[in-house]
Amino acid sequence: MKSHVDFVGVLFIVWGLLTVLIGVSTLALGVGAVALITSSGHRGDGGGQVAASLTVAVFTALALIAITWGVAHVVVGIPLRRHTPWSRLMALMLGSVDLLLLPYGTALGVYTLWTLLSEGGKDLFNARAEG
């Protein structure tokens, strides 16, 4: 079971880094939208400005959520590979939410729950907490 737990830790780190990359690229789209708003020389209809501002707000919010979610996975994935007891609980929480992120998050969530809720997974972290 140790190899499964270590692999879940690696998957958390990879998933987190990819999510951060997506968040940074989405943030770049938001910055690009801001550049388009500020560089437009004409002040046309107000609807276009509202739509552009809404686009910036949505891209920025989604980017910050993705970056935070990715960093959380990396922060949990590293101690999970060291079998730190608190990381098991955090990985179970993150993995439970990952179930909603089809299709890769679902696979990661199922594998996380299967690994960390099995008796071997529990024993691995309990032995670390006691010793």
Image (spheres, rainbow, N blue to C red):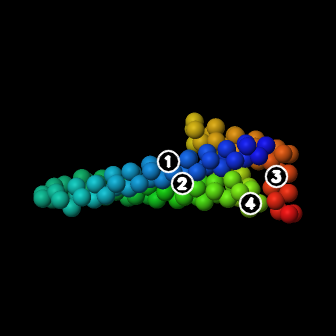
N-term-proximal mark, 3 vs 4: 4
Viewer-closest of 55 and 46: 55
Using the numbered discs, state the Cα–Cα distance from disc 2 to disc 3 in whole angstroms: 25 Å
Using the numbered discs, state the Cα–Cα distance from disc 2 to disc 1 in whole angstroms: 7 Å
Viewer-closest of 99 and 17: 17
Label 2: which secondary element:
helix
Residue at (40, 58) in percent of width and height:
60
N-term-proximal mark, 4 vs 2: 2
Using the numbered discs, state the Cα–Cα distance from disc 1 to disc 3 in whole angstroms: 28 Å
Q: What residue would you read off at disc 2? A: 70
Any part of residue 100 in sight? no
Based on the displayed image, in which of its 4 quarters is residue 61 positioned?
Answer: bottom left
Q: What residue would you read off at disc 3? A: 124
- Labelled disc at residue 18: 1
The N terminus is located in which quarter? top right
Based on the displayed image, in which of its 4 quarters is residue 85 positioned?
Answer: bottom right
Dot in front, 4 or 2: 4
| Rendered location of residue 117, percent (x, y) | 80, 46
The C terminus is located in which quarter? bottom right
Q: What residue would you read off at disc 4? A: 84
Dot in front, 2 or 3: 3
Disc 2 residue crowd, few under 14, some 14–19, many 20+, Cα 10 Å: many
Dot in front, 1 or 3: 3
| Rendered location of residue 36, percent (x, y) | 22, 55
Residue at (12, 57) in percent of width and height:
42
Q: In the rendered structure, are the residues bearing label 4 and label 2 in contact, judged by CB atoms less than 8 Å apart?
A: no
Q: In the rendered structure, are the residues bearing label 2 and label 1 in contact, judged by CB atoms less than 8 Å apart?
A: yes
Disc 3 residue crowd, few under 14, some 14–19, many 20+, Cα 10 Å: some
Label 3: which secondary element:
helix
Q: Which amino acid lies under the numbered mark 2 shown in the image of this protein?
A: Gly
Label 4: which secondary element:
loop
Residue at (21, 61) in percent of width and height:
38
